[in-house]
Amino acid sequence: MLRVRLRFPLWVAAVLVLCAALAHGQHTALDLDGNAVNPLAADSSKIAVLVFLRRDCPVSSRYAPAIQQISKQYADRASFWLVYPDKTDSPQAIRKYLQDYGYHLPALRDPDHVLVKLGHAQITPEVAVFNLNRQLIYDGRIDDWYVDLSRPRPAPTTHELEDAIRAALAGKPVAKSEVRGVGCYISDLE
């Protein structure tokens, strides 16, 4: 019996898995170990919330406590995923960011902007909320805390992310399905 051993570097295997997943229409990104992950297939009993962040965006960083509070509040009914669309972010840099801001949510790298396109994200921080049928029901800002990049309100007066989560859980439409946020543009969007 002739045994042939093929040795692929781990990154080649990850690229092949990602390409195969994309060819089959799956909505995948890479976890911090280089594995292809489809956050919409992870737990079909929960709605899915993608939170788009950039490590170098001060607005993204300032939202860390709010994102963590909302994700804890809905943890039993919603799966939250942090999505990093910057092509230059390394897994090590993202891990450090997660540690620095006390995140305990799963993080994905989306250098090919598969999830960015799916969630219609344009800047960070923005979110995309998918109902149990995996239909996008909301994309945009978390709330209206920021008037512009340098001017936050003392406190938000609207709470679009929480409104969208409640609507998704109730199986109802969101009053506004898209509200652009204030933050840092996602580079290399097509």
Image (cartoon, rainbow, N blue to C red):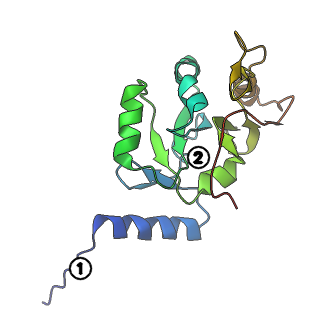
> With 169 as the anchor, is 44 left or right in this view?
left
Q: Position of residue 146 (x, y in %)?
A: 72, 23
> With 184 as the anchor, is 16 left or right in this view?
left
Q: Is residue 179 visible?
A: yes
Confirm or deny contact between disc 2 and disc 1 (CB under 8 A).
Answer: no
> In percent of the image, x 71 and y 21: which residue is there?
151
Where is residue 153, by image quadrant? top right
Instruction: Indicate which disc, 2 or 1, sits on the residue closer to the N terminus.
Output: 1
Residue identifier under label 1 = 6
Residue identifier under label 2 = 40
Q: What mark, if any, has residue 168 been given in the picture?
A: none
Q: Secondary structure beneath disc 2?
A: loop
> In percent of the image, x 73 and y 45: which residue is there?
135
- Which residue sits furthest front? 150
Q: Quadrant of the C terminus?
A: bottom right
Q: Tell me if mark 2 has few (under 14), some (14-19) or many (20+) residues whose alpha carbon lies within 10 angstroms of its own.
A: many
Q: Is residue 9 above or below residue 164?
A: below
Task: For marks 2 and 1, give the CA distance.
Answer: 32 Å
